[in-house]
Image (tube, grey):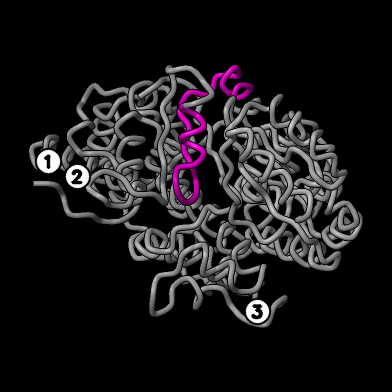
Amino acid sequence: MAEGKVVLLFPGQGAFDGELLRAAHREHPEVAQVFTAVDRVAEEMFGRPLSPVVFGARSVDIADLLRDDPWVSQFAIYASDVAAHLVLAAQGLRPDVLMGHSLGEIAALVAAGAYSVEDGARIVAHRVLAVEAVSPDGYLVALSTPRTRAQLLVDLVGDPFVAVAAENDDRQVVVSGASAGMDTLQVVARHLGIGSVRLNSPFPFHSPVLRPAVAEFADRIRGLPRHRMDVRVYSPILRRYYGDEDVLADLLAGHLVQPVAFADGLRRVHADGGRVFVEAGALTALTKLVTAVVPNDTTSLSTLARGRDDVLALTGTVAALRASGLLKGESVRRLAETLAPGVDPAVFAAFWAESRGEIVDLVADRLEAFTSGRAPVAPPAPIRLVPLPVEPPEPQVVKLAAVPSAQVDREDLLLEVRAVYATALEYPEEVFTDDVLLEAELGVDSVKQIELMTRVATRYGISEQARGVRLADYDTMGKVVDFVHAAIVEGHLDYPVAATK
């Protein structure tokens, strides 16, 4: 696999595979969590949920969705994108850059934490409603020709409501516009020997036809709360990265009429170090564009697509990322272990998907207050996953006498401690040898080391006094085990534990 930054790509119009989405739904609880959140918005704004359509008695495809109300296909594509991202995040992937294609850009902003999953669905809903209000008559066509020739073809048609909507690679351009002009364009393209395919989209996005919907769309979403992004998002429409100062409502509304320079976007993120490209969504349209646009020093992986032996590609992608050491980041499951021990991981994942932006804002404010010395801004309300239980009475502390070292077998202790680390980090136990460097070789950051040391100390009843250690002194598994061994032998315990054989 190529070495470099990881870029997640979020597909747009037409990116849906009902059969493979159902397979992911069976294997990964994160898919159900996303669709449950999207269902709430669908019921709120359209009076019925999405899940019965995509997870009903029979598998559906994009043609089925397009025969339904316009919001159905848009919600299904958005939810598929976000679900694929959440599955990867739950496995521990921390991408460096996010980039979406058209509708996929909304999913990218949600994945970055700018909006919650539900508010992202509301943006998609208002996008549909604003466009429907102008009753657009038109469609999109992909042309097998370079951009310069496509632009000449558009100029030849001479319809002000027809425009280049996207440049996907050096040989494929999308044109969008009013039906009359698009019909003429296809006739001319056929006579010139230019291949054309009508795309699966309910509206002629990225064309002048939708200009009357821009202000309406911006007004509809202006009040949605926007949060700090914790991953960089590159916009192939804006041709730049998003910034904290951007007014997202106005920019997203402008997308309705602005073209997607996706090929240039791939070149830009590649120039910025992107080497591993993962398509977070259905099919393989964007991974194919990576292969066509950027050099051969890249790796392209898909998720909700068919992999080898006709199985879900997501399984092989997760395995490849893990084998390359790219799943060392703090996953949602590991965050649950640290922030909410005892809470059902599925509950925490749903909570995190909904509240991550708010939590990131809170942490950023508290960190800035800590470093600057100012008083932190009080949050509007405490953030709790579940009602806090009544604290039990403090147990009586019983100090143990020192355990003779002959009763404590260090090798057995090593097996026990490394099992704790292996389970928490989802690594094979055999990697935790005596001399393995936890951070330098296994990528276990200081926050996770503190959490694991606390867990081990609690397991063996090691006193708070003995826990006050410097992580720099315990940078290998062997040193951690020696610390636990010495605490047991010397009697630094707050309550009895069975001595290791």
Which callout, 2 or 3, points at the residue further toward the start of the chain?
3
Q: Which residues are magenta?
A: 267-291
The answer to whether marks 1 and 2 mark residues whose Cβ atoms lie closer than 8 Å is yes
Q: Is residue 342 among what the camera can see?
A: no
User: Residue 160: where, in percent of width, then height?
Assistant: 88, 43
Is 46 drawn above or below residue 285 in the view shown? below
Of marks 2 and 3, the one in the foreground: 3
Q: Residue at x 72, y 65 (%)?
A: 125
Which residue carries the number 1 mark? 412
Quarter-wise, where is residue 240 in the image?
A: top right
Which residue carries the number 3 mark? 43
| Residue 412 relative to residue 344: left or right | left
Which callout, 1 or 3, points at the residue further toward the start of the chain?
3
The answer to whether marks 2 and 3 mark residues whose Cβ atoms lie closer than 8 Å is no
**3D distance between C-alphas at marks 2 and 3:** 49 Å
Q: Residue at x 78, y 61 (%)?
A: 137
Q: How many marks?
A: 3
Which residue ends up furthest to the bottom in the rendered image? Answer: 47
**3D distance between C-alphas at marks 1 and 2:** 6 Å
User: Residue 340: where, in percent of width, then height?
Assistant: 49, 58
Query: Circle 1 — which element?
Result: helix
Residue kind at label 1, given as amino acid type: Asp
> In the depicted view, which residue is nearer to us: 283 or 154?
154
> In the depicted view, which residue is nearer to us: 449 or 127?
127
Of marks 1 and 3, the one in the foreground: 3
Query: Circle 2 — which element?
Result: helix
User: Residue 272: where, in percent of width, then height?
Assistant: 60, 19
